[in-house]
Image (spheres, grey):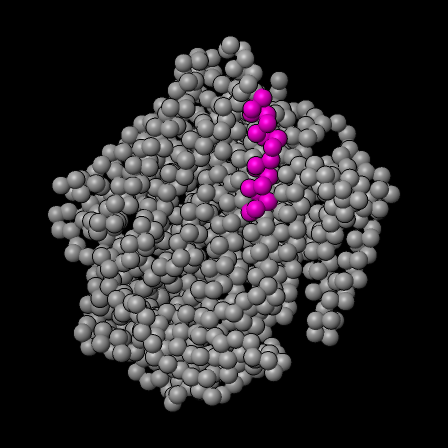
């Protein structure tokens, strides 16, 4: 009985959430304007109410999936009674309606987090922040309710069974990728809300940036994580050994990441030196706008991509209007109210400010490059100049030199001082590092395979140039003040070091895997062997095996290296019994320095099979570096600075009450 | 206090972008525009479903306007699409199938159950051709002109209305 009404309850909860978000938007913003404390006080309870209601709707949809309510159109389109329960729960965000619901849930979740962790904020400021987040929620919840209702029924003739979740999505890697990525996208709404609140209140000081910083780095960490997950999935599941395709949707996630990276650095300057205020606000607006645009690009289908979902013009129009209102109004507000006086005092070209400014400019140019590359086909189409697609060569051609430029300043930035750094000091701090980097970078390719390569040298030079001065800094600190000195360094400093070295690690991975990968497509019969990149692969046997819900052909492959037996690999070609879908289960043997990658292709005549064998050196470093960046973001947000401040304010409030 | 014009630059840029996006939206309201439109059919060398020793290349698509249909026996929507494909085949349309992530025995069973409108079936068990085509699920269809250039992309299954309203007119236009 209760089961029958699940979807309607969910829809009802969604409408209540919408009402709550309207109240959350209206009263606190007006209250802050007219200075009515009671109106402002509405913000927190409404943010919680909105979250609870969206969560109820979300749970109802999950239960509809779990109980196979195929009379719900969305369930029928994305599930099947035979789908394993965990994929049923994940199928909730397998399609458009559900992923928008997830978006709204995460937005409401960030709102609640703000109410919980921002007790130290001035009342009017908090009211404005939550009001702005409420406005965003109004937009998205109305979008879900009006154009993308996930609870719509197929009545009076509900289907017997569902169409099943898109087979490509039935994979653990891909299942966690969207929520993490959305956490990042939506997380930038907090930085955005802080920026708008600051603009509205005319309170654009260094304190604003201190409040916004931890939120921004957490969102940035999630976004980095989401992007890395997507790339990793593409690598092991799509089976071409590629890890980045410059697909429009990948670009849509890269753009807010670049803006977010610039924002983190610019926030640092604003907090520490009071400079770049206006610029920081603009970046906060940009990062969230690009997140919204990413959503628009994926959901509207204006750009074609592997990720594009079947779409409906009313949805595209709605999101575009939403985007127009949100971004247009905030940029108008920015134009009218951005601070006109740049603070922070003068700085020389050899100061940390200057380095961070250049870093910001390079990141922005990268961002524009991606933006132009992604939208160029659309522009040509609009001007009736025909249709083209912009491919990897364009992006690589521009991105590689820009990254090199970025790396140059990344090497100097962290070891330079605010305001001005005497050239001598700079030389002392990074001179030896530069020399060592040059020697290692030239020698490494020679030692690796006896052949010198300019590309590898430049790549390694970049990575070492970033890393070595940071390490020197540590050693210096250790020598000067011992372990206690290291302990005294703030957490955010460690975060910065880990993040920067993380990028260096990723660069090493990218450079080496691009230069030293070996790939062979071979025909192999049992008993034959083949040599790829110095490794000998021998196909010992091919067996038919039976798994829990699939049957498979499994190859047994012995790998030897320098006459030494390394390991046995078992690539499989599975046929899932229920869906009748074949799946290539690649065998991966990885360690820190190389991946061996074996995939069974198709059976050829006789006993032979087509096999794809790849040796990919250092490919793991790409994601290891990304993970380091994730850790660095979370670590930075947990810095004592942000907590101490809160405690102190909390105490003073209690004291005044007493 | 007068506003500084320079601060309006981001707004102006955004308005330009919004117009562009709006235009993109108006351009193709119903279907996802394939990046492959007006480009030659991606290169492939694959066996056919009928004969695993016979390798075919994009050459098989040349010389005649062809409807390329990406399908799989595992895909329930493809069953709903079969009557329309059979209808098209009856009207003399050359249909080449791409049997996407499938097994030969299953494909054969599927065709004996639901009919075979295909002049030829390319066997794509790994989905490599499907990936090059930017397919995210079956069924999807492409219309390829006599020179092997992709001219139309249809996402999802072809309904009876689609046959009359879009597929046939597009085919006729290209045949001229």
Whether A636 is among the magenta residues is yes
Whether B133 is among the magenta residues is no
Q: Position of residue B162 (x, y in %)?
A: 25, 60
Q: In this view, does A218 lie above or below A165?
A: above
Q: For this rendering, which residue is in front, B85 or A171?
A: A171
Q: In this view, does A593 lie above or below A427?
A: below
- Tell me the residue at 73%/58% (across/down): A461
Q: Where is residue A195 in the image (x, y as percent from the top left)?
A: 54, 29
The region drawn magenta spans: A630-648
Q: In this view, does A509 lie to the left or right of A431?
A: left
Q: For this rendering, which residue is in front, A365 or A222?
A: A222
Magenta span dominant secondary structure: helix
Q: Is residue A274 left or right of residue B63?
A: right
Q: Where is residue A98 in the image (x, y as percent from the top left)?
A: 33, 46
| Residue A294 visible within the image | yes
- Tell me the residue at 60%/39% (across/down): A636
């Amino acid at each position: 009985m209760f089961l029958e009404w699940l979807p309607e309850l969910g829809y009802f909860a969604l409408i209540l959430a919408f009402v709550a978000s309207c109240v959350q938007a209206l009263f606190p913003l007006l209250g802050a304007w007219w200075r009515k404390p009671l109106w402002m006080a509405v913000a927190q309870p409404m943010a919680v109410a909105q979250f609870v209601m969206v969560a109820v709707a979300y749970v109802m949809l999950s239960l509809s999936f779990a109980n196979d309510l195929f009379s719900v159109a969305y369930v029928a389109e994305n599930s099947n009674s035979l789908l394993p329960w965990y994929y049923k729960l994940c199928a909730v965000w397998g399609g458009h309606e559900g992923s928008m619901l997830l978006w709204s849930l995460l937005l409401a979740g960030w709102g609640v987090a703000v109410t919980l962790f921002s007790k130290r904020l001035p009342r009017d400021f908090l009211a404005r922040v939550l009001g702005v987040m409420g406005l965003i929620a109004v937009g998205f919840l109305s979008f879900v309710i009006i154009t993308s209702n996930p609870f719509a029924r197929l009545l009076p003739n509900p289907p017997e069974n569902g169409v099943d979740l898109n087979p490509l999505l039935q994979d653990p890697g891909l299942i966690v990728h969207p929520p993490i990525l959305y956490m990042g996208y939506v997380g930038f709404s907090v930085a955005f809300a802080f920026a708008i609140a600051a603009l509205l209140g005319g309170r654009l000081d260094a304190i604003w940036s201190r409040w916004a910083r931890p939120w921004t780095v957490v969102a940035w960490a999630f976004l980095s994580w989401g992007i890395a997950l997507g790339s990793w999935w593409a690598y092991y599941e799509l089976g071409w050994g590629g890890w980045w395709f410059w697909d429009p949707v990948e670009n849509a996630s890269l753009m807010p990441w670049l803006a977010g990276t610039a924002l983190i650095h610019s926030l640092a300057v604003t907090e520490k030196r009071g400079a770049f205020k206006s610029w920081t606000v603009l970046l906060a607006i940009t990062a969230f706008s690009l997140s919204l645009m990413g959503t628009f690009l994926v959901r509207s289908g204006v750009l074609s991509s592997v990720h594009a979902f079947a779409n409906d013009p009313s949805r595209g129009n709605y999101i575009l209007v939403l985007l127009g209102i949100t971004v247009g109004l905030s940029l108008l507000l920015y134009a009218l109210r951005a601070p006109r006086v740049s603070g922070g005092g003068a700085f020389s070209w050899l100061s940390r400010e200057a380095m961070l400014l250049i870093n910001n400019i390079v990141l922005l140019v990268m961002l524009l490059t991606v933006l132009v590359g992604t939208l160029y086909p659309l522009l040509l189409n609009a001007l009736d100049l025909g249709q083209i697609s912009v491919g990897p060569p364009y992006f690589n051609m521009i991105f590689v030199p820009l990254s090199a430029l970025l790396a140059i300043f990344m090497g100097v930035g962290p070891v330079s001082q605010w305001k001005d750094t005497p050239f001598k000091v700079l030389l002392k701090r990074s001179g030896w590092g530069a020399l060592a980097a040059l020697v290692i970078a030239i020698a490494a390719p020679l030692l690796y395979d006896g052949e010198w390569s300019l590309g590898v040298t430049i790549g390694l030079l970049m990575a070492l140039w970033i890393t070595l001065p940071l390490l020197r800094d540590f050693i210096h600190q250790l020598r000067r003040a011992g372990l206690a000195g290291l302990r005294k360094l703030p957490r955010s400093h460690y975060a910065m070091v880990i993040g920067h070295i993380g990028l260096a690690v990723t660069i090493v991975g990218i450079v080496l895997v691009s230069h030293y990968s070996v790939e062979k497509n071979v025909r192999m019969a049992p008993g034959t062997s083949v040599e790829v990149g110095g490794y000998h692969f021998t196909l010992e046997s091919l067996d038919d095996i039976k798994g829990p819900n699939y049957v498979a052909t499994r190859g047994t492959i012995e790998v030897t290296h320098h006459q030494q037996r390394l390991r046995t690999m078992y690539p499989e070609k599975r046929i899932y019994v229920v869906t009748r879908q074949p799946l290539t289960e690649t065998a991966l043997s990885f360690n820190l320095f190389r991946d061996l990658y074996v995939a069974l292709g198709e059976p050829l005549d006789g006993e032979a099979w087509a096999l794809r064998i790849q040796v990919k050196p250092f490919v793991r470093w790409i994601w290891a570096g990304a993970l380091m960046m994730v850790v660095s973001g979370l670590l930075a947000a947990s810095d004592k600075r942000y907590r101490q401040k809160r405690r102190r304010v909390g105490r003073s409030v209690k004291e005044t009450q007493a | 206090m007068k506003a500084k014009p320079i601060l309006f630059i981001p707004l102006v840029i955004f308005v330009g972008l919004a117009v562009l996006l709006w235009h993109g939206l108006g351009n193709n309201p119903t279907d996802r525009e394939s990046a492959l439109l007006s480009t030659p059919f991606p290169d492939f060398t694959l066996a056919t479903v009928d004969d695993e020793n016979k390798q075919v290349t994009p050459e098989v698509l040349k010389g005649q306007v062809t409807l390329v249909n990406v399908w799989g026996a595992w895909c329930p929507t493809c069953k709903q699409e079969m009557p329309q494909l059979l209808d098209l085949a009856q009207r003399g349309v050359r249909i080449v199938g791409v049997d996407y992530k499938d097994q030969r025995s299953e494909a054969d069973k599927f065709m004996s159950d639901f009919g075979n409108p295909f002049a030829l079936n390319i066997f794509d068990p790994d989905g490599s051709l499907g990936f090059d085509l930017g397919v995210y699920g079956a069924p999807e269809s492409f219309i390829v002109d006599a020179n092997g250039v992709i001219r139309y992309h249809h996402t999802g299954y072809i309904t009876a209305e689609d046959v009359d309203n879009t597929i046939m007119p597009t085919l006729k236009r290209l045949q001229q």
